[in-house]
Image (cartoon, rainbow, N blue to C red):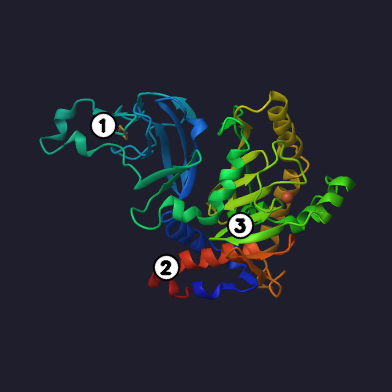
């Protein structure tokens, strides 16, 4: 028996079942991923009409498709006949999606245009009612494309709140005013909960410990003197060394900021990292490396080298993080200790520019994310019930 949902988050602590309980994971898919704005793609992934990308919106396989008129359509990747995905490629360009099972064929807009031997379905069958389902809302900000399964609720701009200005600064570092992407994506998975990656994306406290073998003394010195703060910002998390100034063009270790845009996007140095929750104890991460449009090629190449060195498959930082995520899930199997501790800085948090901020190694930003988690998870009375 675990506590009721509204008992799982305390001001400086999170209950272990938030990471281990598959029922909670199922409720997260329903009450978070099916209601809020979820990051799906960057515009540079689908620049041309017909370009598409397949991904997951919570548990929904989706196709993010650039339409002939330049708009972005997000279609549920599930054949209206008997349910298989109609597109298996991760990316591509096509005017059509054809289901391999019985060859029902859909336009990239989702319209059903081909059914072999349609007569046998009788007179009530209407192709125009059997297109690929579209998700309720699609919007974008600074080239970041988000989707929502919910027709109501805050706009994307309202959802982003204060972090929008950080995205402005991130994109604003590009002399050409927008981001481009290096080819290919880096994919990995770990046996641990998706929220470990969220916490870790804005967690300077661990850098001088877990990554001690990777952080040079010089960088450590800069890091320790560097000031900065962590911010709980409209449900998202920010670590900020910039005092809201623009990100340095070369994303040097001493500058910039990390953003965790709840629930599944991390903007960290040269990368856009997307979190794909699979189960309570399984998570996938897809990463694209960012180029600054119009920047000198050597600057962009440095961004890629920085990414490879620190966050590539054998990167000095990322391997440490993945290891600790799995160790955390393993440790949390034990119910002998019920709570994880997030109280660092709780007594010294301050309000700056309308947001709660803490010292650079505080857990202020995590507390903000879990307040947001709790608010979404308890929206609706059915969730208040404890369960056996
Ligand atoms: S299941 Fe897709 S065409 Fe039959
Ligand atoms: Fe790390």
Q: Which mark is residue 155?
A: none
Residue 101 image position (x, y, % from top left): 34, 30
Residue 40 image position (x, y, % from top left): 48, 42
Can you say whether 340 is above or below 263 in the image?
below
Cα distance in 3D space between marks 2 and 3:
21 Å
Can you say whether 135 is above or below 89 in the image?
below
Residue 251 image position (x, y, % from top left): 71, 40
Cα distance in 3D space between marks 3 and 1:
42 Å
Whether tag 2 and tag 3 are in contact, CB under 8 A, the answer is no
Is 60 left, or right, of 206 in this rendering? left
Q: Which mark is residue 112?
A: 1
Q: Going 31% across and 41% down the picture, which residue do you hit?
A: 133
Residue 274 visible? no
Q: Quadrant of residue 311?
A: top right
Is 262 left, or right, of 360 in this rendering? left
Q: Secondary structure at mark 2?
A: loop
Whichever of callouts 2 and 1 sits on the residue coming sooner in the sequence is: 1
Residue that label 3 marks:
237
Cα distance in 3D space between marks 2 and 1:
36 Å
Instruction: Give the farthest residue toward the left.
Output: 123
Whichever of callouts 2 and 3 sits on the residue coming sooner in the sequence is: 3
């Amino acid at each position: 028996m675990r506590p009721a949902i509204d008992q799982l988050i305390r001001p400086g602590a999170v209950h272990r079942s938030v990471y281990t309980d598959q029922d909670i994971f199922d409720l997260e898919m329903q009450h978070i991923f099916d209601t809020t704005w979820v990051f799906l793609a960057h515009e540079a992934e689908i620049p041309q009409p017909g370009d598409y990308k397949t991904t997951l919106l919570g548990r929904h396989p989706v196709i993010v498709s650039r339409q002939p008129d330049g708009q972005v359509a997000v279609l549920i990747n599930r054949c209206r006949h008997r349910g298989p995905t109609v597109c298996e490629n991760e990316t591509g360009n096509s005017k059509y999606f054809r289901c391999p099972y019985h060859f029902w064929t859909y336009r990239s807009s989702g319209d059903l245009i081909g059914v072999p031997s349609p007569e046998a379905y009788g007179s009530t069958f209407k192709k125009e009612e059997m297109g690929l389902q579209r998700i309720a809302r699609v919007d974008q900000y600074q080239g970041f494309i988000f989707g929502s399964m919910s027709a109501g609720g805050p706009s994307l701009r309202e959802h982003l709140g204060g972090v929008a200005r950080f995205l402005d600064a991130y994109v604003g570092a590009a002399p050409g005013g927008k981001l481009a992407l290096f080819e290919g994506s880096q994919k990995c998975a770990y046996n641990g909960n998706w929220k470990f990656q969220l916490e870790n994306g804005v967690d300077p406290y661990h850098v001088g410990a877990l990554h001690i073998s990777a952080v040079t003394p010089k960088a450590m010195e800069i890091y320790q003197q560097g000031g900065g703060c962590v911010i709980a910002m409209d449900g998202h998390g920010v670590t900020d060394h910039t005092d809201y100034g623009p990100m340095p063009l070369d994303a040097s270790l001493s500058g910039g900021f990390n953003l965790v845009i709840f629930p599944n996007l991390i903007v960290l140095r040269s990368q856009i990292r997307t979190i794909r929750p699979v189960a309570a104890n399984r998570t996938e991460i897809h990463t694209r490396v960012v180029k600054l449009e119009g920047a000198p090629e050597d600057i962009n190449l440095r961004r890629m080298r920085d990414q490879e060195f620190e966050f590539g498959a054998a990167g000095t930082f990322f391997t440490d993080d993945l290891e600790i995520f799995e160790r955390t899930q393993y440790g949390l199997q034990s119910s002998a200790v019920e709570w994880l501790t997030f109280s660092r800085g709780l007594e010294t948090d301050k309000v700056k520019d309308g947001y709660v901020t803490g010292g650079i190694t505080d857990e202020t930003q995590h507390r903000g994310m879990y307040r947001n988690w709790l608010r979404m998870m308890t929206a609706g009375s059915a969730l208040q019930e404890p369960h056996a």
